[in-house]
Image (cartoon, helix red, strand yellow):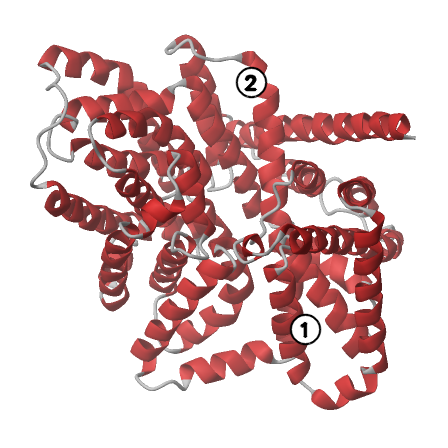
Amino acid sequence: MSKVFRVLDKIVDQISQGLAAVLVAVEVFILLTGVVGRYVFGHPLVWCDELAGILFLWLVSLGAVIALRRGEHMRMTVILSRFGPRAQRLANCFAALLVVIVAFGLIVPGLSYAVEEQAFLTPVLQISGTWPVVGQLTALALLLYVALRQLLSQVNWGDLLLVLGFTAAVFLAFGSLESVFEDLGNFNLVIFFFGIASFCIFAGVPIAFTFATATFGYMHFTTTLPLSVIITQMDQGMSSIQLLAVPMFVVLGLLLEMTGIAAAMVNFLAALVGHRRGGLSYVLIVAIYLISGISGSKAADQAAVGPVLLPEMKRRGISGGELVAQLAASTAMSETIPPSLVLIIVGAVTGVSIAALFTGGLLPAALASAGLAILVFFRTRKDRPGGRRASAREIGRLFVVGVPALVLPFVIRYAVLAGVTTATEVATVGVVYAVLVGIAVYRCFDWRKLMPILVGTASLSGAILLIIGCASTMGWALTRAGFAQNLTDMMTALPGGSTGFMMVSIVLFIVLGSVLEGLPAMVLFGPLLFPGAEQLGISLVQYAIVAILAMGIGLFSPPFGVGFYQSCLIARVSSDEAFGPIWAYLATLVAVLLIVATVPWISTGFLP
């Protein structure tokens, strides 16, 4: 039997990874074709966006399968890690069971949804609306298989029976309380979207499946709506063409690391100021600022810069705690640097112009970088200068080598601001540029790594966008129940008007960024809070930048922020050693955040 499962596992991997890799490459080609047709030949190809959107839903669904197979779905394990092995096994079994239930719960209504879509034709290609759903259902079937395999292979039967009994008891108990739920009104939202969701998050259930579980429970036990609404709302949440920028920038970030472009940029900066007191710390801050403008991924930022700089910083006597603090704080402030994935997603889910967010995020991040640099200056002023001063000849050589890397951020920003490409398409220009530079200039393009890059892109994109789809469904349910309006009314009625609203929002997003991570927090609460900010006369660009900075601070704040532990892993430093030094850096970022929140011009001064 185990041999049969090994064969099936191999087939599932080949189908999901092979098809997902092809889809990533095809999406790059389609978007690039659209840019060339429109800008070079003056002939827009109207079918490009529609085809890209259909394939995008397939890509996201297959990426979610790969992420589940690899264990890469976002989940919070800080609380769970404090329990014993038995409790952790039971929690992992419970998480795997919920993934099975959610996957099955999406397939059943998805079949009726596919039948309904047969009656519709797509506007441009004039093909059946069933096609996008067929790809999703195929991927959901694979997801169900992977979830079942993980459930049955990772636990013993005693644990499984105990978890099954607990889950069945909860289901029956909630079923017997349906008449009570009818009388509770909006208090049901607290039970399902706070109580159930919090329990699942702390139990280590992946964030996306937590949102889906809470929404399934709320709709099944408190409403008469068909569950097919869930997959419909998921599709709407994930199908925005703007979100296609997520896999595009992920693949760009991975290519930058593989082709040596990121290393060339960092080496030049190190030659300039690496010999000064705290010189490499300044290089780290500036390198993250530049790299994040072209990778769009926090993990890619740290992976590109950390291995190049951190070993030398350790050799120069910088403590491990300081390394983690500087790496984490630099990455936290980089959330607002275009084309950050968070900027793109905020624009997609709230309706704020992505181009405006790209412009508005640069100066706040520069201010945060300056604040971190000032802190580094005072913390290193008694240190001895480290390293040898590079000669003018060496600096010149490294500058020449680094020119292709240093030019790329400006090429990307110019392409968007000049209207050559949209924010969704611009990453394809960067991908072509990175491939050409890697092959012709740095001669560091390893074709054997291309397949893992494409598969890794699909996996990360699937994990991110499944959260967006499930959070969109959860947000729809909250809005339908009137929670969005109630939240807006409560926030706008706070003392202090717009100032009070902004201060409470900062605290809220820091907490949410720490507990939920920035991405799901913004997807869930952004559409609910932004109307209140607009009602009070706050610029939505400023509010978005403040919210993103606050979430970045929360994400890298111990003890819950997973970004803090990610930084520890990359620096290979224990979290205990980094726990003390990081607070000074986070306090600096909070001070900058308050300045950005009180001075709108910093975010809006350069908007057209």
Asked where in the image residue 406 lies, by quadrant, the reply is top left
The amino acid marked with disc number 1 is: Phe
> Residue 162: x and y, percent?
81, 59
**Could you tell me if residue 42 is visible in this image?**
no
Q: Secondary structure at mark 1?
A: helix
Q: Nearer the viewer, residue 385 or 294?
A: 385
Q: Residue at x 42, y 44 (%)?
A: 340
The residue labelled by disc 2 is: 449
The amino acid marked with disc number 2 is: Lys
Q: Identify the residue at the far right of this view.
A: 1
Separation of marks 2 and 1 at Cα, in angstroms: 44 Å
Sequence-first disc among 2 and 1: 1
> Residue 24: x and y, percent?
62, 30
Residue 439 numbered mark, or none: none
> Residue 20: x and y, percent?
69, 31
**Could you tell me if residue 188 is visible in this image?**
yes
Q: Residue at x 47, y 45 (%)?
A: 341
Residue 192 numbered mark, or none: 1
- Identify whether 5 is placed above or below 340: above
